[in-house]
Image: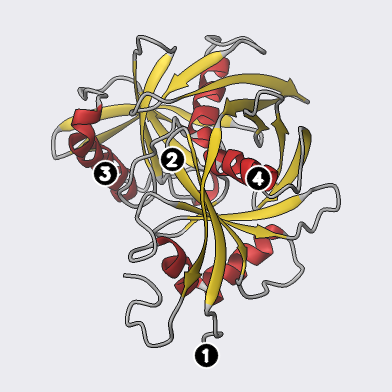
Amino acid sequence: MRPSVDKIHVIDSHTAGEPTRVVLSGFPDLGNGSIADRLEIFRNDFDHLRSAILREPRGHDAIVGALLCEPSDETCIAGVIFFNNVGYLNMCGHGTIGLIKTLEHLGRIGKGIHRIETPVGIVEAELDTDGAVSIENVASYRYRKDVEIEIDGDEKVKGDIAWGGNWFFLIEDHPMSLEPTSIQELTRYSSSVRKALKIAEITGENGQEVDHIELFSPAKNADSRNFVLCPGAEFDRSPCGTGTSAKLACLYEDGKLKEGEIWTQESIIGSSFEGHVKIVDGNIIPVIKGAAFVTAESELILSKNDPFRFGI
């Protein structure tokens, strides 16, 4: 039997144009286990609330949810579970930046370094004096280089499989124009790539699905422009924190980026993140800097007689 949930308190923000909805209260108790354990409880027992929070009529497909939790690690100020319109995310860079700005808006944190517990490990986030947020992501790496697949029957595409907190297929050589006017075509092309990876049973490490597709092109005002197709059929309005992390790892491994060297990644809508890498105990640790802005604070009302109470 589903628990009775009538109101859910949320704060909305956007990071470089990509929306985040932080759930503050009204969500059922997920216990005191690790954030990874609580993610599984969320997935198995409360997936209907994921849909209610993010999908129409209360949301839309581009919103990423961030359930604020008490951390199991006492060195952290918060735990978080990220989710979207079709499922759950291991980590979310733009969402972590949005979470930090939300906690600042609530008066719970000030300037300085704060630790956040995610399902894939602890990330550090620094709230800078200029209001921007820098996140020190989980260790990132390239799993496979120059993987070739065939899409649409005869077209061949080559890309790298890399981890940046989520699994990405990164494509530099492609026929697409990375302009906002081409978003429908970019979505179709990237969806074909993801489908081809699945058909060919090409995965990340330990058989994990490569569910993010990332295309790159040169940019006038940055080192690179990208288009990122997220799980489902929505594109990332921001340059994608975990996607930029995966890209930085590949650049470092190719000798194209030195430790500490700044890389500016532009999104399909023209917003940008700054990134660099640190090498810690032989691991590539990406650091991503961006800005977020709180846009709304509200209560989601789940009326018992609403036929679309749990979303469409």
Q: In the depicted view, which residue is nearer to us: 176 or 192?
A: 176
Within 10 Å of disc 2 (Cα), the crowding (few <14, some 14-19, many 20+) is many
Within 10 Å of disc 1 (Cα), the crowding (few <14, some 14-19, many 20+) is few
Mark 2 to mark 3: distance in Å? 20 Å
Q: Quadrant of residue 157?
A: top left
In the rendered view, would you say 302 is above or below 271? below
Q: Earlier in the sequence, mark 2 or mark 3?
A: 2
In the rendered structure, the answer to whether residue 128 lies left or right of residue 261 reads right
Q: Which of label 4 and label 2 is nearer to you?
A: 4
Amino acid type, label 1: Met
Residue at the limit of the structure toward the right, as seen here: 74
Q: Which of label 2 and label 3 is nearer to you?
A: 2
Q: Residue at x 61, y 72 (%)?
A: 26
> Tag 3's secondary structure?
helix
Q: Quadrant of residue 215?
A: top left
Q: Earlier in the sequence, mark 1 or mark 4?
A: 1
Mark 3 sits on what residue? 191
In the rendered view, would you say 214 is above or below 216? below
Mark 2 sits on what residue? 18
Q: Earlier in the sequence, mark 3 or mark 1?
A: 1
Mark 4 sits on what residue? 105
Q: Are marks 4 and 3 in contact (CB under 8 Å)?
A: no
In the rendered structure, the answer to whether residue 122 lies left or right of residue 5 reads right
**Quadrant in the picture for the C terminus:** bottom left
Amino acid type, label 2: Glu
Q: Earlier in the sequence, mark 2 or mark 1?
A: 1
Q: Position of residue 180 (x, y in %)?
A: 25, 29
On the question of residue 193 being in view, the answer is yes
Mark 1 sits on what residue? 1
Q: Are marks 2 and 1 in contact (CB under 8 Å)?
A: no
